Image (cartoon, rainbow, N blue to C red):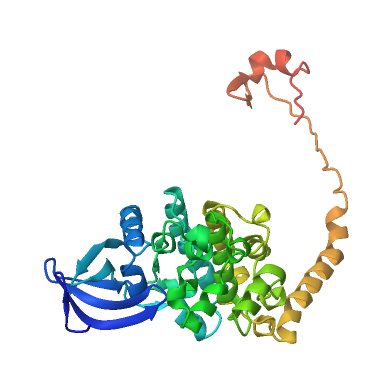
Amino acid sequence: MVGTTLAHYKITSHLGSGGMGDVYQATDTKLGRSVAIKLLPDAFASDAERLSRFDREAQVLASLNHPNIAQIYGIEESGGTRCIVMELVQGETLHDRIKRGPLTVHEALTITKQIAEALEAAHEKGIIHRDLKPGNVMLTGDGRVKVLDFGLAKAMSGANASASNPNLSNSPTMMSMAATNVGVILGTAAYMSPEQAKGRAVDRRTDIFALGCILYEMLTGKRAFDGEDVTDILGAVLRVEPDWSQLPDSLPSGVRNLVRLCLEKNAKNRRSDATDVRLDIEQALKEPVDTIGIAQLPVESVKRPLWKRAIPIVIAAFVAGVIATFAPWNLKQSPPKTVTRFPLILPQDQSLIMAAGDLFYDARDKRDEILGIGPNVDE
């Protein structure tokens, strides 16, 4: 397909393959932009009923306009080949990132928050992903998360798929068209909710379960549910609890509880709303840095030498001793001050002016009023 042209899209490279078809990078010759083109499998493209259903669903999917959702631009058909034209997202998949090891708690929460925001926007429009997994989450170079293939599970299932095989409408990568792609089947089964694995009708809570699986895997580097084949994996999804001891010790208790609630096997007990998940994560991200796993130092590295830690204790003891020694002197009551009195006899032609507040009195004229002692004045 590389070098060929579909409608006005010139295919330039092959990006990958999956249960929903091959994906290529192409150039939109009309608008001059790069896009991603997903070629629909032959089994799908030859089914007129599915194509009709897909066209209807694609109109709804195209209405999803959110920074964390890779947008669908349109549907094209050329020479009998049917394809979906989508936003081209540059970066790496979350699946490839996890291969290099667990993420820090802060990184995992930041990514999960953006996925939750994408789910929140889609669920408000009644769109369920149904096939959420690390391979469908892209990490761009600027730190943004883009969720791919939103709602294609429902769009690519036939109108009567649920009646003949409920799995067809619940997870497209479990459909017969992907039966030979063991890796895709295993990868999808590991993130299916219990009700989805049983072939029952699904709602937004199945996306919450898958989100819990992704968060667990980012924190531990291991899948919450694993096995050698699809039967083992689905059996674990239905009956086995994840190994909670694998979660990092630095994980805040609120986040640990959130992971458990997202992975509840009974949908009635599960976190049911992407908004609640987002709010829980936002609260956790407000915690101090050390409690969410970034730049957390070992206890030994922040301890000072013993002699340095003893200095404040010695100084405090010395100051306390000085205070104890001199405090009794300060507590003794001071002796009363001595008052000295002496007589003062003025000649009849002399006067004494005394200050009393802002008033001045002539002792000769006012002494009888003020002192009442004649010419003898006490100090």
Q: Residue furthest left?
A: 30
**Which of the 4 image quarters holds residue 324?**
bottom right
Residue 226 vs 253, above or below: the answer is below
Residue 110 vs 18, above or below: the answer is above
Image point (70%, 73%), residue name: 244
Image point (55%, 62%), residue name: 285
Q: Quadrant of the N terminus?
A: bottom left
Question: What is the tally of numbered marks visible in this picture?
Answer: 0
Estimate the x, y position of residue 116 in percent, counting from the top left. Answer: 49, 59
Residue 207 vs 20, above or below: the answer is above
Image point (68%, 75%), residue name: 249
Q: Is residue 58 left or right of residue 185?
A: left
Estimate the x, y position of residue 239 in percent, counting from the top left. Answer: 71, 69
Q: Is residue 289 left or right of residue 11?
A: right
Estimate the x, y position of residue 28 in percent, counting from the top left. Answer: 16, 70
Estimate the x, y position of residue 233 in percent, counting from the top left. Answer: 63, 77
Q: Is residue 343 left or right of residue 216?
A: right
Task: Decide if residue 260 is in sight here.
Answer: yes
Q: Quadrant of the C terminus?
A: top right
Front one among 243 and 187? 187
Task: Decide if residue 141 is in sight here.
Answer: no
Front one among 228 and 122? 228
Front one among 52 and 139? 52
**Which of the 4 image quarters holds residue 211?**
bottom right
Q: Is residue 130 left or right of residue 224?
A: left
Image point (78%, 30%), residue name: 343
**Which of the 4 image quarters holds residue 258?**
bottom right
